[in-house]
Amino acid sequence: MPPALSGRVAVWDPFVRLFHWSLVALFVAAYATGDEIGWLHVRAGYALAALVALRGVWGFVGPRNARFASFLRSPVETLAFLRDSLRLKAPRHLGHNPAGGAMIVAMFATLAYVSVTGVLLTADAFWGSHAMKEAHEAGVDVMIGLIFLHLAGVALASFEHRENLVRAMITGRKRA
Amino acid sequence: MRKTIIFASLAALVGAAGVASAAHADSLGRPCTTKPEKDYLTLDALKAKVVEQGYKIRSGEIKKACGEFYVIDKAGKKAELFVDPTSGVIVAGGGKGKE
């Protein structure tokens, strides 16, 4: 095996990686075009919602590290993991750690909410509705908060276990 | 099953084509007037002008030198109107029916 690959294992399959970075691009596109370029904003929103739905299915039929059963943990276990992380004493996980699993649940729920309120805004009933617009934007604000937490968590875990988790989500490989 | 999902994802990324015709919000991309803000009518006065022209207003604001209104037109269709804030004259959006 070439030196660069020796001692590294495949962790993230191509769909998981494509999904993750597409979500980033689509969210940025949607965020940037909000009230400005309607046709692009709506398309990004629908594509995003479709991708999340597909990831949902993949979570049941995909390879091991993609499956929800492999990384979702109870709230008790997740809080314990978070506490240990802040003490830099959390165990290393090859796939998503419990905090990552919780973040995925939170983000999917929030994106679903943002998508649904977005679609409602295009319906006759809510066209021009200030209240629905506020509801939609509140969800986006939550998503922004989650993104910051996510980046902080990835940085913490990377530091804690001395690995580049961003690169791992690009190449799919990690130290064994 | 996995191949189906991958193919469907690529399709989602490339298109969302069927929904391109959905109603949506825009900025006009250019000012509706070059006159200074002191020449603008009040939002209430602009709303009255829009209603006069046969529209039902859902919401509106003055933004980027335009009066921007989400309306239902005489035919019951959703539309976004851009009006000259100094006169209430519709600059864009009037003729375009959105479903």
Image (cartoon, helix red, strand yellow):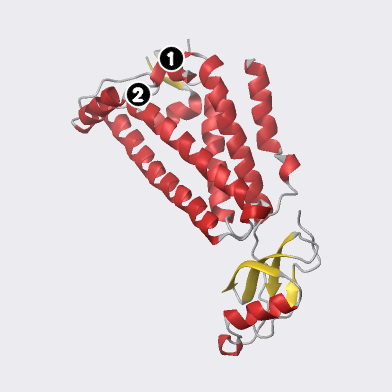
Mark count: 2
Residue that sits furthest to the left in the current view: A87
- Chain label for disc 2: A
The x and y percentages for residue B97 are: 79, 60
Residues at marks 1 and 2, CA–CA distance in whole angstroms: 17 Å
Q: Is residue B26 left or right of residue A150?
A: right
Q: Is residue A160 left or right of residue A31?
A: left
Residue that sits furthest to the bottom in the current view: B39
Q: Is residue B59 above or below residue A47?
A: below
Residue type at the position of mark 1:
Val
Among the 4 quarters of the image, the one containing residue A103 = top left
**Dot 1: what SS?**
strand
Q: Is residue A99 above or below residue A123?
A: above
The x and y percentages for residue A128 are: 61, 61
Q: Which residue is mark 2?
A: A97
The x and y percentages for residue A30 are: 57, 49
The x and y percentages for residue B42 are: 58, 83
Among the 4 quarters of the image, the one containing residue B65 = bottom right
Among the 4 quarters of the image, the one containing residue B47 = bottom right
User: Could you tell me if residue A143 is visible in this image?
Assistant: yes
**Dot 2: what SS?**
loop
Residue depicted at x 70% and y 32%? B11
Q: Which residue is mark 1?
A: A9
Q: Is residue A21 above or below residue A162?
A: below
Residue type at the position of mark 2:
Asn
Residue depicted at x 49% and y 29%? A170
Q: Nearer the viewer, mark 1 or mark 2?
A: 2
Q: Earlier in the sequence, mark 1 or mark 2?
A: 1
User: Could you tell me if residue A62 is visible in this image?
Assistant: no
Which residue is at the front of the view, B88 or B38? B88
